[in-house]
Amino acid sequence: MAKKAAEAKQQKGSDSAEAPAQEAVQVEGLQFDIPWEQLMDDERFVEVFLSDVLENYVVQQRWYGGKSSTMKYIELQEYFRIQHNEEVYYGLLLEVNFEEAFYQHYFLPIAFVSDESFAERDRILPLAIRGQEGFIIDAVNLEAFRRLVYERILMAEPNDTTRVRYHKSTEFRGTPYESSKFMGLEQSNTSIIINGKSVIKFFRRIYADKNPDYEMSRFLSERKGYKNTPAYQGSLSIMDTDNVNVTIALMQELVPNQGDAWDYMLKELHKIFCNLEYKGIRVDRLPKLELFQRINSRQVPPEIIDWAGLGVFLKLQKLAQRTAEMHIALGSEFEDTAFTPTRFNGDYEVWLKNRLLYMFQNRLNMVENNLGRLEGQALELANEFLERKNEIRKRFVNFDWTKLKGERLRVHGDYHLGQILVQGDDFFLLDFEGEPESTIRDRKVKQPPLKDIAGIFRSFHYAVYATIFDNPGKYPYPQDELFAAGELLYRYFVGVFLDTYVQMIQDHNINIGYSAERIFLLKYCMLEKAVYELGYEMNSRPDWAVIPLEGIRSIIND
């Protein structure tokens, strides 16, 4: 039936050149004389449901990741039931096909409601089932649905072999369902707080494999006892028609927190920049530090401590400790091949270069086509980026695995301040899905752990510049002097973090290479990250393209 729906959409597209454009499917007054429990078996319903109505709904959702492309049609890949006795919901696996000749898969749970006043913004299709008028809606809006998923996880059998699989951690001591609500910070997934103690994250964009967030969360908290990530509590998955395990939802501990590390860092940096005037700091007289030079917080010059305070450096040491502990846990597995450390080799080098050169060419095209949207320093740096493209490309090509002695591990993959929660003087690491642009296979490739460190360093750099951009006129200094102060402070952040991290990693025999190798990998991975960031900024906020462009220049100039 999914094939017929797809063929209908293709036919509609092929006829449009000769016939007048057809109007959107008229859905008023749809009647189906078939029980809800059998509705997905009705070809007429499926055809209507997969029409423009669903397309218009999907493109308006925050979790939809295809907004920069042109949707061609939606196909129903398959569906499954989420049920208990007479309570039935459908989980739909949708394939969104694009004019640009690629596709994405999404998960959409649906329910039928007859209450006129309910879920007005999340109605997908009005219809009547056996004379009962109502609406098809996204089921996550229903407390009954959220309760059912939680209870099915709570009652899960240890070795569920059914098609729809619920799993409960052996460490989870759940309590009966009391209440649930949306977490509110909705992005690519939908998170529901249960009983004020747990979070069920419904993955919206799905992949034909186990989700990395599920794998990493379960491995770290259940297998390795790593305490600074939300504890894995359970999951929901489905074995699809190709017998592939597809992760649908992940349940974790709700960690009380004071917000993420990005907001914390912006507040700290704002106070630090305000201190320039308050304490009469002369930026040109502050002691300099080479990038990647390790320095303990006790060794930070008194002039820097007087300006920035000691607290921020102590926090960075704690964050470095938690990061090192994560990599120590990931590097200490010798049974599960998905997590065992491995060496660099020729296959990895070929994979890395192909991936990065493709990305780099994409960013070059993007900058060339959007120069007119840039001005000032962003335009100057963009032209320099284009002029030095061969030099940058050579940096990516200059990766020789035979000279590297360290090991590769499963890593976070998208490590930045927004993926870290602040809890008092401590930090919790979360969201292990990996980079949004990467394929599911690429996200699971073992990488040098310094890739994560490069990611957090780039996030420090972003926070410095974001503070300057977000507070125009609040610091009575020329912008170039603020940039100079920010670059200097950034190097001390990097030095303090790196000192704690490297010491802990080496104490636990995780091989991240010798000193020159570490610096090479950090520069390489930071250049990769900055070029990756350039794509987001050129698409979303060209004024901020100056941040990754400045990062690229500073890396290749250093």
Image: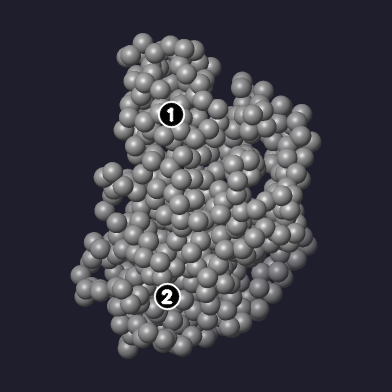
- x and y percentages locating residue 421 in the rendered image: 35, 49
Q: Quadrant of residue 467?
A: top left
Q: Is residue 86 above or below residue 213?
A: below
The count of marks equals 2
Q: Is residue 27 left or right of residue 368?
A: left
Q: Residue at x 46, y 39 (%)?
A: 499
Q: Residue at x 25, y 73 (%)?
A: 174
Q: Is residue 396 left or right of residue 282?
A: right
| SS type, badge 1 | helix
- x and y percentages locating residue 316 in the rendered image: 39, 39
- Work out which quarter of the rendered image holds the C terminus and state it: top right
Q: Quadrant of residue 221?
A: bottom left
Circle 1: residue type? Thr
Distance from disc 2 to disc 1, alpha carbons, whole Å, reads 40 Å
| SS type, badge 2 | strand
Q: Which residue is mark 1?
A: 467
Which of 38 and 444 lies nearest the eye of the viewer? 444
Q: Which residue is mark 2?
A: 236
Label placed on residue 256: none
Q: Is residue 184 above or below residue 533?
A: below
Circle 2: residue type? Leu
- Are circles 2 and 1 on residues that touch, CB within 8 Å? no
Within-10-Å neighbours for mark 1: few <14, some 14–19, many 20+: some
- x and y percentages locating residue 78 in the rendered image: 55, 79
Which of 171 and 343 lies nearest the eye of the viewer? 343
Q: Is residue 374 above or below residue 132?
A: above
